[in-house]
């Protein structure tokens, strides 16, 4: 199945858009739609709001069944007004993989892995950046910039290359090399800085007036949330509009966690789901856990984490601008924030590869480690149905290789092979 314009029934038409306005997530102040915005006047993320009564009257669950299996099937829930601005790279619906062996070993309820590594550029960052770039194109942006630990930069580079938008990407110096190469190879002007992602974010922010670029950093524009929101819409549809008991989400900037919660609220408002919500669990690494620390202290905002270090680079975010949104959602859902060790991440990654045949990224493996840990503490009940988010393909990361060599000059000794 292809996803080009020839298979899109809305290639040259206006899309049905129900955007009413934008709203400051902190103060509630209203901002006009169809204008270029970054943060609100309060320095907080803006949220896109819709006329949900009109949206609910314009589409039914049954309508979705006639559409392609891509996240653009939820177009009424998205802000793009003109189909010509959609940038497609094959945004497939990602599978829910049952982890039956892990479930049996842990003696718990159903475990489903939402494998976001199947998306373009191999990560769930494609969701947010596909929508953000489409809206940037619609609003006349010609140059974009962002800080990244890897996967977001790759997605931005790919979608902007397709959309003919110039891109500048800034990475911490220890960003995985394959990510850096991917970003540069797909057309972004790529820079490494000897600091953390928030240091790279300062480069972008300070350079806005000098360079004339639009800052597409996490939560510093309104539309990456809308793209990530499709994870919640898609998950609800895949589970027949019955949400799971618990969602474990690898949390750095937290855009996806915020977006899914927004999706659930919108679905309830139009009557597609009830009031039941999953308990949202924000998973971080012990070497960088500002959200966990704030949750445990009962704070609404997280203090920046110093000397952040973890193998799960995607969740190595010392300070999240949407910290209060993440913490509000975790508490409202009766969930929690939890940190896991790098050792447990590696163990979980290996276990899923050898037992389930699923190659998780380190951030996805962190959710497996967290589930195992929290079944022991009792914060997760053995009867609960759990969804774990694997946010990228494990192929982007180094893997230990336990292999042996055969010297064909000496012949093949099958006894050695049998005993290996």
Image (cartoon, rainbow, N blue to C red):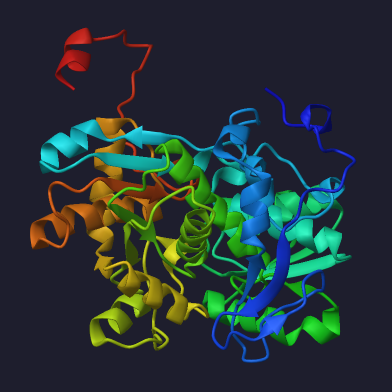
Side of 367 relative to 28 (left or right): left
Q: Quadrant of the C terminus?
A: top left
Q: Quadrant of residue 95?
A: top left
Residue that appears at 12% across and 48% down: 382
Residue that appears at 53% across and 80% down: 321
Give percent across and percent down for residue 216: 69, 70
Position of 227 relative to 254 (above/below): above
User: Does residue 182 appear in the picture of this structure?
Assistant: no
Give percent across and percent down for residue 419: 14, 18
Give percent across and percent down for residue 39: 67, 82
Side of 18 relative to 95 (left or right): right
Q: Quadrant of residue 207?
A: bottom right
Q: Quadrant of the N terminus?
A: top right
Residue that appears at 39% across and 71% down: 329
Q: Nearer the viewer, residue 112 or 340?
A: 112
Q: Nearer the viewer, residue 194 or 31?
A: 31
Position of 15 relative to 218 (above/below): above
User: Does residue 46 appear in the picture of this structure?
Assistant: yes
Position of 176 relative to 34 (above/below): above
Residue that appears at 65% across and 68% down: 48
């Amino acid at each position: 199945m292809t996803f080009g314009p020839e298979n899109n029934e809305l290639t040259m038409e206006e899309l049905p858009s129900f955007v009413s306005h934008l709203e400051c997530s902190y103060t509630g102040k209203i901002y006009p739609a169809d204008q270029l915005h970054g943060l609100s006047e309060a320095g907080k993320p803006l949220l896109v709001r819709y006329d949900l009564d009109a949206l609910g009257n314009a589409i039914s669950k049954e309508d979705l069944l006639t559409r392609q299996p891509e996240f653009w099937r939820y177009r009424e829930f998205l802000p793009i007004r003109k189909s010509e601005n959609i940038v497609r790279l094959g945004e497939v619906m990602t599978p829910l993989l049952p982890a039956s062996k892990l479930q049996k070993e842990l003696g718990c309820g159903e475990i489903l892995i939402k494998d976001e590594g199947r998306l373009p550029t191999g990560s769930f960052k494609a969701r947010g950046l596909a929508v953000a770039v489409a809206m940037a194109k619609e609003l006349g942006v010609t140059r974009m910039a962002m800080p990244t630990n890897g996967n977001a930069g790759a997605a931005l580079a790919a979608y902007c290359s397709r959309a003919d938008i110039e891109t500048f990407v800034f990475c911490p110096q220890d960003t995985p090399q394959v990510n850096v190469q991917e970003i540069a190879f797909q057309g972004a002007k790529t820079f490494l800085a000897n600091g953390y992602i928030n240091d790279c974010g300062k480069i972008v922010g300070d350079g806005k007036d000098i360079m004339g670029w639009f800052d597409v950093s996490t939560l510093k524009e309104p539309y990456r949330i809308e793209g990530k929101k499709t994870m919640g819409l898609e998950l609800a549809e895949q589970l027949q509009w019955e949400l799971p008991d618990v969602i474990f989400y690898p949390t750095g900037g937290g855009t996806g966690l915020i977006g899914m919660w927004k999706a659930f609220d919108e679905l309830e408002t139009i009557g597609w789901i009830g009031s039941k919500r999953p308990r949202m669990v924000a998973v971080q690494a012990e070497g960088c856990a500002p959200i966990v620390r704030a949750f445990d202290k009962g704070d609404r905002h997280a203090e920046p984490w110093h000397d952040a270090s973890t193998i799960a680079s995607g969740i190595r975010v010392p300070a999240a601008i949407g910290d209060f949104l993440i913490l509000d959602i975790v508490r409202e859902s009766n969930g929690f924030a939890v940190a896991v060790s790098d050792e447990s991440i590696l163990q979980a990654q290996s276990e899923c590869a050898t037992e389930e045949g699923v190659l998780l990224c380190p951030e996805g493996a962190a959710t497996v480690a967290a589930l195992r840990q929290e079944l022991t503490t009792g914060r997760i009940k053995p009867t609960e149905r759990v969804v774990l988010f694997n946010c990228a393909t494990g192929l982007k990361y180094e893997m230990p290789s336990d292999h042996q060599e055969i010297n064909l000059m000496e012949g093949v000794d099958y006894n050695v092979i049998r005993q290996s």
